[in-house]
Image (cartoon, rainbow, N blue to C red):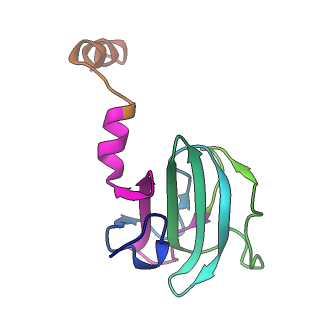
Amino acid sequence: EIEPGDWSSDVCSSDLLGIGEAPIHPILPGIVLSSGKDSLGQFVVLDHGNNVTSRMSGMYPVNPADTVPFLEGEYLDMNSIVGRLAPRDSATFYLTVRHNGFFVRWADLYSQTHPLDSAEIAKFLQKIEL
C-alpha cells in the first residue's frame, strides 16, 4: 500500500517529452521541500500550498556544478528554471502531482483550478484574430 507523501513508489507519475536541454519550470509557484540527485537524475519537490505538492525528476541540472540545486524553504516562481532536459534529440522527465498526499493527474487538477467557459475562449480567439 502506498502511504500519502511517500515519493519512493511513484507508479503514477507522468512522463513528459521534449527537445533536449529545454528548461523545466515549476507547474505552480512553491516552496522547496527537498532537492538533489537520485537514480533518475536531478529532482526537486515543491509545496504549492493548499495541500498540493509536485516532484519533478529525471532532469539535468541548470548548472552542472550544483549537487543540491535548491535550498529547503527556497521560494520558486513559475519563471524559475528547476532543471533541463537531457541533451538528446528527444528527452523525458517525470512529474508527479499530489493533493492531500495522493496522486492526481495534473490535467485534472489544472482544469478544476483554472476553469474556462466557451464564451471566454471565443473572446480570447477573437482578440488574437483566429
Q: Is residue 8 above or below residue 130?
A: below
Residue 74 shown left or right of residue 105 in the figure:
right
Q: Position of residue 15 (x, y in %)?
A: 35, 68
* Magenta stretch holds residue 117: no
The residue lying at 29 percent from left, 13 percent from top is: 126
Identity of the residue furthest to the left in this view: 118
* Magenta stretch holds residue 104: yes
Q: Nearer the viewer, residue 81 or 36?
A: 36
Quadrant of the rendered image containing residue 13: bottom left
Residue 29 shown left or right of residue 18 in the figure:
right
Q: Nearer the viewer, residue 66 or 23?
A: 66
The residue lying at 43 percent from left, 56 percent from top is: 97
Q: Is residue 33 above or below residue 109?
A: below
Q: Position of residue 104 (x, y in %)?
A: 34, 54
Which quadrant holds the C terminus?
top left
Q: Is residue 101 above or below residue 63?
A: above
Residue 99 shown left or right of residue 122 in the figure:
right
The residue lying at 51 percent from left, 46 percent from top is: 51
Quadrant of the rendered image containing residue 49: top right
Q: Position of residue 62 (x, y in %)?
A: 67, 68
Magenta segment boundaries in residue numbering? 83-112
Which quadrant holds the N terminus?
bottom left
The residue lying at 63 percent from left, 45 percent from top is: 79
Q: Position of residue 21 (x, y in %)?
A: 54, 68
Q: Nearer the viewer, residue 104 or 42?
A: 104
Number of marks present in the image shown: 0
